Image (tube, rainbow, N blue to C red):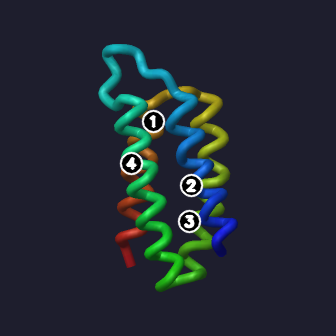
Amino acid sequence: MISLRNTLSATFLSTALVLSAPASAACTPEQAQQKAMALSTQLQAVAQKDAAKFQKLSQELAQESTKLQQAGNTDAVCKYYDDMLAKTKSK
């Protein structure tokens, strides 16, 4: 479980850090990184309570992170992290 958490944290950070936002972007790379850390913390809480939900969310995150990195759109990353945070809090 620890290696999976480390992998997820690295995925969050790499997604947030590879993005460079234009000055007009609504979400900065720093905000994306903050959201990534919040999501990582929330996913760790989910892992302790519901392993199946954690696995499902982790798989979704891994698949979507690659797409987001390739797109390089910080606003899309922030929106995705917000959506994932909502999913971690839903039942």
Q: CA distance from mark 1 to mark 2?
A: 18 Å
Residue named by callout 2? 9
Q: CA distance from mark 4 to mark 3?
A: 16 Å
Q: Is residue 47 above or below residue 17?
A: below
Q: Which label's residue is closer to the chain start, 2 or 3?
A: 2
Q: Position of residue 43 (x, y in %)?
A: 48, 67
What crowding class fits label 1: few (fewer than 14 Cα within 10 Å), some (14-19), or many (20 or more)? some
Query: Residue at left 60%, top 57%?
Result: 8
Residue named by callout 4? 35
Residue named by callout 1? 76
The three-letter code of the residue at mark 2 reads: Ser
Of residues 4 and 53, the one drawn nearer to the viewer in this rendering: 4
Q: CA distance from mark 4 to mark 1?
A: 12 Å
Residue named by callout 3? 57
The three-letter code of the residue at mark 4 reads: Lys
Q: Position of residue 71 (x, y in %)?
A: 59, 28
Q: Position of residue 27 (x, y in %)?
A: 34, 31
Image quarter (top left, top right, bottom left or bottom right) of the N terminus: bottom right
Query: Residue at left 56%, top 65%?
Result: 57
Of residues 25 and 8, the one drawn nearer to the viewer in this rendering: 8
Q: CA distance from mark 3 to mark 1?
A: 18 Å
Query: Residue at left 65%, top 53%?
Result: 62
Q: CA distance from mark 4 to mark 2?
A: 12 Å
Image quarter (top left, top right, bottom left or bottom right) of the C terminus: bottom left
**Foreground disc of the pair 1, 2:** 2
Q: Is residue 73 left or right of residue 65?
A: left
Query: Residue at left 44%, top 75%?
Result: 45
